[in-house]
């Protein structure tokens, strides 16, 4: 985690994640609002934005709401932008994961683009399913709390459901990335525990980050660019957690090999046996 390569990869991933975040969110809002006509799912996305964006992001959320019901041409631009930026995320990710696992060759550019497209679709479907499931769960639980006169209780329960159900989504996304993105065979038995660990670290790190955010004093330094810097910085922290989870999956692989001691075990370079 203290090597220059890891930070270079993390910054590259964070920048592309920032570029793809708003088009991706706009697509989800549009699908729920205009495609499925499910206002509860639409409200879940807005809740996620309020829960995960720092203070001062109300204008951004309002803009997304306006664009979600805007002209279809703008939504098409978002789809194209998402496909372009998603490849930017997965390209440095593949290189980083191949290096961690010790796979000697990266995919060709065209193969990486094709895989990036498929992974973007899979991640989008996972997010959409999670949003729909969260909306249905919130509706059922809040219906059972109709007897409660306090609106505050309903809000707390709704937020609790949102936070709890977001953890499986993060874990699923990490698993898909760890398992399918490296250019070689990554054992699922090693990848799954690492994805679970990285998912919980991400959720825990989010709360720690927002609690300590005032200490960074971004507004005093960056002024009107505070929101952008805040989002990029959090994306950078999340990228470090993602790469740390990849490191854990490789270390678990070596710990489970009977010949680890004879071969030198995991040394931090991700050296794997030759892949045929």
Image (cartoon, rainbow, N blue to C red):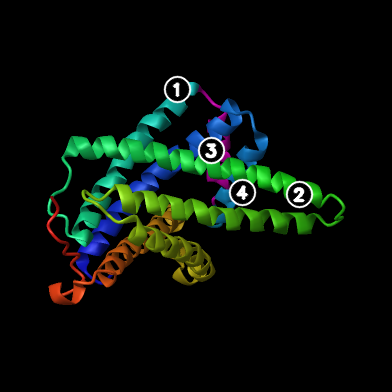
Q: Quadrant of the N terminus?
A: bottom left
Residue 49, given in percent of the width and then of the height, sits at 55, 49
Q: Is residue 13 above or below residue 262?
A: above
Specify which label sits upstream in the sequence, 4 or 3.
Answer: 4
Q: Secondary structure at mark 1?
A: helix
Q: Is residue 207 magenta?
A: no
Would you say 77 lies left or right of 164 here? left
Total number of numbered labels? 4
* Residue 267 appears anywhere in the view: no
**Residue toward you, 109 or 73:** 109
Q: Secondary structure at mark 4?
A: helix
**Residue toward you, 71 or 184:** 184
**Residue toward you, 55 or 171:** 171
Residue shown at 39% from the left, 42% from the top: 20
**Residue toward you, 34 or 173:** 173
Q: Secondary structure at mark 2?
A: helix
Specify which label sits upstream in the sequence, 2 or 4.
Answer: 4
Residue 24, given in percent of the width and then of the height, sits at 45, 39
Specify which label sits upstream in the sequence, 3 or 2.
Answer: 3
Residue 73: mark: 1
Numbered range of the magenta stretch:
57-71
The answer to whether marks 4 and 3 mark residues whose Cβ atoms lie closer than 8 Å is: no
The residue that disc 4 covers is: 47
Residue shown at 14% from the left, 72% from the top: 263
Residue shown at 80% from the left, 50% from the top: 144
């Amino acid at each position: 985690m203290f090597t220059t390569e890891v930070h270079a990869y993390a910054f590259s991933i964070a920048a592309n994640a920032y570029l793809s975040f708003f088009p991706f969110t706009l697509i989800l809002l549009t699908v729920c609002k205009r495609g499925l006509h499910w206002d509860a799912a639409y409200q879940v996305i807005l809740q996620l934005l309020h829960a995960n964006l720092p203070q001062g992001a109300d204008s951004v959320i309002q803009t997304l709401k306006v664009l979600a019901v805007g002209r279809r041409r703008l939504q098409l631009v978002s789809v194209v932008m998402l496909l372009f930026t998603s490849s930017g995320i997965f390209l440095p990710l593949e290189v980083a994961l191949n290096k961690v696992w010790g796979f000697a060759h990266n995919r060709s550019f065209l193969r990486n683009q094709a895989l990036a497209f498929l992974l973007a679709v899979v991640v989008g479907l996972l997010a959409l399913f999670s949003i729909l499931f969260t909306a249905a769960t919130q509706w059922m639980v809040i219906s059972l709390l109709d007897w409660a006169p306090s609106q505050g209780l309903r809000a707390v329960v709704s937020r609790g459901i949102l936070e709890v159900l977001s953890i499986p989504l993060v874990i699923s996304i990490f698993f898909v990335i760890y398992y399918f993105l490296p250019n070689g065979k990554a054992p699922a038995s090693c990848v799954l525990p690492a994805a679970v660990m990285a998912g919980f670290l991400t959720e825990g790190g989010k709360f720690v980050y927002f609690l300590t955010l005032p200490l960074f004093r971004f507004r005093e330094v960056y002024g009107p660019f505070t929101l952008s810097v805040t989002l990029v910085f959090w994306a950078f922290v999340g990228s470090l957690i993602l790469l740390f989870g990849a490191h854990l999956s490789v270390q678990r692989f070596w710990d489970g090999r009977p010949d680890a001691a004879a071969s030198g075990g995991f040394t931090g370079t991700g050296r794997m046996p030759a892949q045929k």
